[in-house]
Amino acid sequence: MKKLLLFPIFLLLLGCGGDKAPPTDPSLTRVRLALNWFPEAEHGGFYAALEHGYYRQNGLEVEILGGGPDAPVIQRVATDAVEFGVSNADDVLNARAQQAPVVALMAPYQINPRCIMVHAGSGIERIGDIADITLALSQRPAFSHYLRKKFPFTGVTIVPYPGNVTQFLMDPHFAQQGYLFSEPFVARNKGGDPRSLLVADVGFNPYASLLIATEEAVAQRETVISAMVRATVAGWEQYLRDPQATNRRIHRLNPEMSLDILAYGAEESRPLILDPIARQQGLGQMSLERWSGLLEQMIEAELIAPGAVEPGRAFTTRFLP
Amino acid sequence: MTPLENQPSPLVVARRLGKRFANDIEALLGVDLDIPGGEFVSIVGPSGCGKSTLLRLIAGLIPLSSGDLTVDQLPPVEARRQRQELAYVFQEATLLPWRTVAGNVLLPLELRNQRDPAFVDQILELVGLADFARAYPSQLSGGMRMRVSIARALVTRPDLLLLDEPFGALDEITRQRLNEELLRLWEEERWTGIFVTHNVYEAVFLSQRVLVMSPRPGRLIADIAVPFAHPRDPDLRTAPEFNRIAAEVSHQLLSSHIS
Amino acid sequence: MNRFLSLFLTSVLPPLLFFALLVLLWHLGVVLFDIKPFLLPGPLRVARAIADHFPALLYATGLTGLGALSGFLLSFAAGFLIALLFSQSRIIARSLYPYAIFLQTVPVVAIAPLIILWIGHGFQGVVAVSFIISLFPIIANTTSGLTSIDPNLLDLFAMNNASRWQVVRKLRIPSAVPAMFTGAKISSGLSVIGAIVGEFFAGYGTDDFGLGYLIILTNGQAKTDYLFACILFCTLLGLAVFTSISLLSNFLLVRWNGGED
């Protein structure tokens, strides 16, 4: 009877709070990494680095803190509540417009997984062709404003994003935003006919799952930053090679994510991470061209005032291996 | 309905009337009562003796437990609904605060789907509140509110007026003034009046008969006649005969208490 | 004219002065501690945001206010009828009251998506959420007002052989008016919250937007100064609603409360 009770308690202790290795070496530098959502496949590389000991090997004791809706990642990093965070490029630019001194260090996703999920039976093949249906978009992220500015969306009723696929399944004239390997997978599993239209394909493509830190940390804790970036890149490479152990870890932390959907996520992420640039220059690269381009798009969509942000200061590639 | 005088049989008749409440409290036991029409009768008794209960039984507000009780030979509720006009004056003025004085007095008529603003004004005149017809109860003194309550009771020209210690909360001077006014009203219209009080002097001043009740469970233990003629003078209160009768009532009260 | 002046000096000026003091302290705090705008914008930045987006803020406040007002009026009417029903039948009251309490305790963010699914997006969804969240105080207070009657008054009506309907019309309902206003004061504030939360889930369609929409937008886009401006307008809306009801209540309840005003 005691053994029966001990096991769930053990699991409970494993799963509660952040995810960290059992405390040992005082010579390791302890840092915390705040995620921008619940642990999912988009965070695979970070968990892989933890799972396979890359952080340890590079002298770091990393505690990964799960996030959720409206997780205040930028605020926590900017106020030094945590040392590192995970964010997207558009959020970084918005934060810098409000004078939050955060800097992007590496970009796993060269192609943003944001998509619009339509019914295959609707015949809609491009985002620009969306018309005469109900479209669920959240006004939180930048991409929805960009799309609404760019496309006429004639006859389209925009409603708030419901956070599930129920309405999509019920209504053939319904489309919604989603993440490439999340909502479409769930919809298909429930018998729906989803078709994913990648937002990046129409030109709006912020880097995703960025590793961020403060300007001050970048200037004054170069060794730690360098170690973190190095280990994280290795983690993402590992995740693409073999995600199984990492996915098991993620599943333990977030049982909502089945191993199936995590495996699917890892698989679908490969072309988004290993695009031609990554193959050529290595994982995590960022360019001024892309950051400037994104800033232009956001200024045009009236999300950021002109001159409020200097794109070159929003990121640095000098720690990339 | 005009008041009925010189009735051949008593208006209110009670035989071995008893009332037991749900919590097993026996308020009244074996009450026998005869009140002819047009008479003004007081009921005095110690606190908790059941005199209010008796009044409410006569009004038909609560059901009796044992014995008989009739008003004009009908059970009280039927009498109230079909024949007699019964009116009740409560211990508190019990006015509707959102209505004017005139509105409050008009209420019983409204509930009978009648309207007679002229008569309302007349009644208010009678109780000396004609100038306050448009005032609200919150703007009146305690004595004035009680007068409105009485006016409201009188507006339906009742045959039987039941009064439950209406002046108990007022100061002595106001109480005496209102006693005189009530007496005048009765002398004018000669409705049947049953007046409950624990103030012996008040009872003797107003009534033609004073009934004394025993402590709980209440029953009537004395019936004392008050033979003074009407109209009565306020000075009556100082007459030796008055005080003798009052003393006898008090004596009855006290002796019942001891035994 | 004199009356308005004295009213201004006693009721309006003190809160205004206090607000000015708060703004001053806020400004000093931001300057002295060098607080960055993404954490806490200073009053000047918020003022600029208000100036920059004034038409949008005004429009959004109006639309949210309309939704809240509709939800409130609906809940007042429905709540009144339900309370009337409860006051007349003890069996119905006992059977249904727990469900009314459910309205009070269920977290609105949990049921709002369900409501939107049934009622639909847009204005009707917003009004529905606002209605649900503001219903209970009306039911509770009105039921209490309708049933807490001085027993002597009930006896008075009995003495006059009043019918059940006469008692309801001439005694219970007027007697319940103060309680109804208490319920209305609580409900009016809740209806604003309900309208905003409703907007989170129901939206308004392609080009319409209320304060709820603006809050999500500014929060998601880290535009904290604009967000603060929205919060200020939300507060003003709530204040306006509450003050109107209070003034109405003071005006109408003079007779119940007693004395010349």
Image (cartoon, coloured by chain):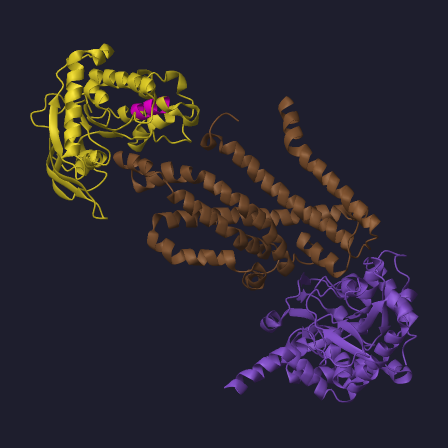
Q: Which residues are magenta?
A: B144-151
Residue B119 vertical placement versus A296 (above, below): above
Rendered hue of chain B is yellow
Q: Quarter holding the N terminus of chain B? A: top left
Measuring from the top left, give residue A59's x and y in whole percent.
Answer: 83, 80
Q: Any magenta on residue B146?
A: yes
Q: Quadrant of residue B119?
A: top left
Report x, y in % for residue B67.
11, 41
Image vertical order of residue B162 relative to residue A217, above or below: above
Q: Is residue A225 found left or right of B54 in the rendered image? A: right
Q: Position of residue A247 (x, y in %)?
A: 70, 84
Is the magenta region chiefly helix, strand or loop?
helix
Q: Is residue C74 above or below residue A164?
A: above
> Where A226 falls versus B167 (above or below)?
below
Q: Chain A takes which shade in the image? A: purple
Q: Quadrant of residue B28?
A: top left
Which residue is nearer to you in this view: A99 or A162? A99
User: Which quadrant is home to the C terminus of chain B?
Assistant: top left
Q: Residue furthest front?
A: B258
**Chain C tint as drawn:** brown
The quarter of the picture where residue A188 lies is bottom right
Q: Which residue is located at x 46 percent, y 41 percent?
A: C179
